[in-house]
Image (cartoon, rainbow, N blue to C red):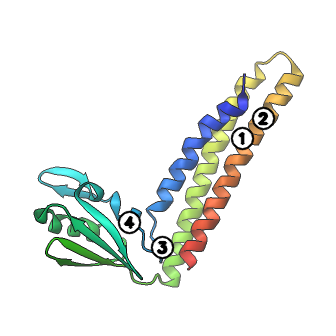
Amino acid sequence: MDYFKEIENKVKPLVEWLKNEFTGIRTNRPSPKLLENIKVNYLGQELLVKQLASITIEPPKTLLVTSWDKTAVNAISKAIESANLGVSTAVTDHTIRVSLPDLTEERKKELIKLVKSMAEETRIKIRAARDSVNKKVKELEDEDMEFKAKEQIQKGTDAANNEIERILEEKTKEINE
Protein backbone atom coordinates (compact mmCIF):
# COMPACT_ATOMS: atom_id res chain seq x y z
CA MET A 1 0.00 0.00 0.00
CA ASP A 2 1.22 3.52 -0.79
CA TYR A 3 1.14 5.36 2.52
CA PHE A 4 2.59 8.52 1.01
CA LYS A 5 -0.48 8.81 -1.24
CA GLU A 6 -2.78 8.10 1.70
CA ILE A 7 -1.28 10.82 3.89
CA GLU A 8 -1.18 13.19 0.92
CA ASN A 9 -4.91 12.61 0.29
CA LYS A 10 -5.64 13.41 3.93
CA VAL A 11 -3.50 16.54 4.26
CA LYS A 12 -4.03 18.14 0.85
CA PRO A 13 -7.61 19.25 1.65
CA LEU A 14 -6.36 20.73 4.94
CA VAL A 15 -3.73 22.84 3.17
CA GLU A 16 -6.31 23.91 0.54
CA TRP A 17 -8.71 24.91 3.33
CA LEU A 18 -6.02 27.10 4.89
CA LYS A 19 -5.20 28.76 1.55
CA ASN A 20 -8.89 29.47 1.02
CA GLU A 21 -9.29 30.92 4.52
CA PHE A 22 -6.24 33.15 4.02
CA THR A 23 -7.75 34.70 0.87
CA GLY A 24 -10.58 36.13 2.96
CA ILE A 25 -8.23 37.92 5.37
CA ARG A 26 -7.79 41.56 4.56
CA THR A 27 -4.38 42.97 3.77
CA ASN A 28 -3.24 46.32 2.37
CA ARG A 29 -3.55 44.82 -1.10
CA PRO A 30 -7.08 44.86 -2.58
CA SER A 31 -8.36 41.47 -3.72
CA PRO A 32 -11.81 40.51 -5.04
CA LYS A 33 -11.57 37.38 -2.88
CA LEU A 34 -11.97 39.63 0.15
CA LEU A 35 -15.60 40.31 -0.78
CA GLU A 36 -16.77 37.47 -2.99
CA ASN A 37 -17.86 35.07 -0.24
CA ILE A 38 -19.70 37.60 1.91
CA LYS A 39 -23.29 36.46 2.42
CA VAL A 40 -26.01 38.83 1.21
CA ASN A 41 -29.63 38.55 2.31
CA TYR A 42 -31.45 39.29 -0.94
CA LEU A 43 -35.07 38.52 -1.83
CA GLY A 44 -35.39 36.20 1.14
CA GLN A 45 -32.34 34.16 0.13
CA GLU A 46 -28.77 34.08 1.34
CA LEU A 47 -26.49 34.57 -1.68
CA LEU A 48 -22.80 35.35 -2.02
CA VAL A 49 -21.60 38.71 -3.38
CA LYS A 50 -19.97 36.87 -6.30
CA GLN A 51 -23.41 35.51 -7.26
CA LEU A 52 -24.90 39.01 -7.43
CA ALA A 53 -22.09 41.18 -8.78
CA SER A 54 -18.70 41.38 -10.41
CA ILE A 55 -15.75 42.58 -8.34
CA THR A 56 -12.81 44.39 -9.89
CA ILE A 57 -9.78 46.23 -8.55
CA GLU A 58 -9.42 49.99 -8.98
CA PRO A 59 -5.85 50.87 -8.02
CA PRO A 60 -4.48 51.70 -5.56
CA LYS A 61 -6.83 50.54 -2.77
CA THR A 62 -10.38 50.32 -4.08
CA LEU A 63 -12.60 47.44 -5.09
CA LEU A 64 -15.46 48.15 -7.48
CA VAL A 65 -18.53 45.96 -6.99
CA THR A 66 -20.88 46.14 -9.98
CA SER A 67 -24.26 44.59 -9.27
CA TRP A 68 -26.05 42.81 -12.08
CA ASP A 69 -29.37 43.83 -10.53
CA LYS A 70 -29.88 47.45 -9.45
CA THR A 71 -32.21 46.39 -6.65
CA ALA A 72 -29.46 44.32 -5.02
CA VAL A 73 -27.01 47.22 -4.57
CA ASN A 74 -28.21 48.28 -1.11
CA ALA A 75 -28.33 44.69 0.17
CA ILE A 76 -24.78 44.06 -1.08
CA SER A 77 -23.50 47.30 0.45
CA LYS A 78 -25.15 46.49 3.79
CA ALA A 79 -23.62 42.99 3.79
CA ILE A 80 -20.13 44.35 3.04
CA GLU A 81 -20.41 46.93 5.83
CA SER A 82 -21.66 44.36 8.34
CA ALA A 83 -18.77 41.97 7.50
CA ASN A 84 -16.50 44.08 9.78
CA LEU A 85 -13.62 44.26 7.33
CA GLY A 86 -12.73 47.83 8.27
CA VAL A 87 -13.63 49.16 4.83
CA SER A 88 -15.79 52.08 3.74
CA THR A 89 -18.40 51.85 1.00
CA ALA A 90 -19.87 54.41 -1.39
CA VAL A 91 -22.95 53.48 -3.40
CA THR A 92 -23.62 55.00 -6.83
CA ASP A 93 -26.35 53.77 -9.19
CA HIS A 94 -25.54 50.04 -9.59
CA THR A 95 -21.96 50.10 -8.28
CA ILE A 96 -20.35 50.10 -4.87
CA ARG A 97 -16.86 51.48 -4.31
CA VAL A 98 -15.16 49.74 -1.43
CA SER A 99 -12.15 51.68 -0.10
CA LEU A 100 -9.54 49.87 1.92
CA PRO A 101 -7.85 52.19 4.40
CA ASP A 102 -4.28 51.39 5.45
CA LEU A 103 -4.05 48.80 8.20
CA THR A 104 -2.90 50.13 11.56
CA GLU A 105 0.08 48.48 13.25
CA GLU A 106 -2.26 47.11 15.91
CA ARG A 107 -4.58 45.59 13.27
CA LYS A 108 -1.59 44.09 11.43
CA LYS A 109 -0.47 42.39 14.66
CA GLU A 110 -4.01 41.03 15.22
CA LEU A 111 -4.16 39.66 11.67
CA ILE A 112 -0.72 38.06 11.93
CA LYS A 113 -1.74 36.44 15.22
CA LEU A 114 -4.92 35.16 13.53
CA VAL A 115 -3.13 33.65 10.50
CA LYS A 116 -0.53 32.03 12.76
CA SER A 117 -3.25 30.42 14.88
CA MET A 118 -5.05 29.19 11.74
CA ALA A 119 -1.79 27.69 10.48
CA GLU A 120 -1.19 26.00 13.84
CA GLU A 121 -4.75 24.63 13.83
CA THR A 122 -4.05 23.12 10.41
CA ARG A 123 -0.74 21.64 11.60
CA ILE A 124 -2.58 19.95 14.48
CA LYS A 125 -5.07 18.42 12.03
CA ILE A 126 -2.16 17.22 9.89
CA ARG A 127 -0.55 15.56 12.91
CA ALA A 128 -3.87 13.84 13.68
CA ALA A 129 -4.05 12.60 10.07
CA ARG A 130 -0.46 11.33 10.33
CA ASP A 131 -1.29 9.52 13.57
CA SER A 132 -4.33 7.82 12.04
CA VAL A 133 -2.26 6.52 9.12
CA ASN A 134 0.54 5.48 11.50
CA LYS A 135 -1.97 3.33 13.43
CA LYS A 136 -2.67 1.37 10.24
CA VAL A 137 1.06 0.90 9.74
CA LYS A 138 1.49 -0.64 13.21
CA GLU A 139 -0.64 -3.56 12.03
CA LEU A 140 2.04 -4.53 9.50
CA GLU A 141 3.89 -7.75 10.32
CA ASP A 142 7.22 -6.82 8.74
CA GLU A 143 9.34 -4.31 10.68
CA ASP A 144 11.15 -3.13 7.55
CA MET A 145 7.83 -2.45 5.84
CA GLU A 146 6.63 -0.58 8.93
CA PHE A 147 9.78 1.55 8.99
CA LYS A 148 9.52 2.37 5.26
CA ALA A 149 5.82 3.18 5.58
CA LYS A 150 6.43 5.51 8.52
CA GLU A 151 9.19 7.18 6.52
CA GLN A 152 6.74 7.77 3.62
CA ILE A 153 4.13 9.13 6.00
CA GLN A 154 6.64 11.52 7.55
CA LYS A 155 7.70 12.75 4.09
CA GLY A 156 4.07 13.55 3.27
CA THR A 157 3.60 15.27 6.61
CA ASP A 158 6.78 17.32 6.19
CA ALA A 159 5.74 18.38 2.68
CA ALA A 160 2.38 19.61 3.99
CA ASN A 161 4.00 21.45 6.90
CA ASN A 162 6.50 23.11 4.55
CA GLU A 163 3.61 24.25 2.34
CA ILE A 164 1.81 25.68 5.38
CA GLU A 165 4.98 27.51 6.40
CA ARG A 166 5.34 28.93 2.88
CA ILE A 167 1.76 30.24 2.66
CA LEU A 168 1.94 31.59 6.22
CA GLU A 169 5.13 33.49 5.37
CA GLU A 170 3.52 34.80 2.18
CA LYS A 171 0.40 35.99 4.01
CA THR A 172 2.41 37.60 6.82
CA LYS A 173 4.49 39.49 4.25
CA GLU A 174 1.29 40.58 2.47
CA ILE A 175 -0.20 41.88 5.74
CA ASN A 176 2.96 43.85 6.54
CA GLU A 177 3.12 45.60 3.14
Q: Where is residue 100, by image quadrant?
A: bottom left
Regarding residue 84, the answer to whether it shows in the image is no
Which secondary structure, mark 2?
helix
Regarding residue 34, the answer to whether it shows in the image is yes
Distance between the alpha carbons at the discs numbered 4 and 3: 12 Å
Could you tell me which residue is drawn at 54 percent across and 74 percent down? 175
Residue 9 position within the rendered picture, expressed as x and y whole percent measured from the top left: 60, 35
Mark 4 or 1: in front is 4
| Residue type, mark 3 in image | Thr
Of the 4 image quadrants, the one containing the N terminus is top right
Which secondary structure, mark 4?
loop
Q: Is there a contact, CB below 8 Å, between mark 3 and mark 2?
A: no
Residue 81 position within the rendered picture, expressed as x and y whole percent measured from the top left: 27, 71
Crowd tier of the residue under label 2, counting other residues whose Cα lies within 10 Å: few below 14, some 14–19, many 20 or above? some
Distance between the alpha carbons at the discs numbered 3 and 2: 37 Å
Distance between the alpha carbons at the discs numbered 1 and 3: 31 Å
Of the numbered discs 3 and 2, the one sitting upstream in the chain is 3
| Residue type, mark 2 in image | Gln
| Residue type, mark 1 in image | Gly
Of the 4 image quadrants, the one containing the C terminus is bottom right
Mark 2 or 4: in front is 4
Residue 36, placed above or below residue 175: above
Q: Where is residue 168, by image quadrant?
A: bottom right
Distance between the alpha carbons at the discs numbered 2 and 1: 6 Å
Of the numbered discs 4 and 1, the one sitting upstream in the chain is 4
Q: Which residue is labeled 4 in the image?
A: 32
Which numbered circle lies on residue 152?
2
Q: Which residue is labeled 3 in the image?
A: 27
Crowd tier of the residue under label 1, counting other residues whose Cα lies within 10 Å: few below 14, some 14–19, many 20 or above? many
Q: Which residue is labeled 1 in the image?
A: 156
Crowd tier of the residue under label 3, counting other residues whose Cα lies within 10 Å: few below 14, some 14–19, many 20 or above? many
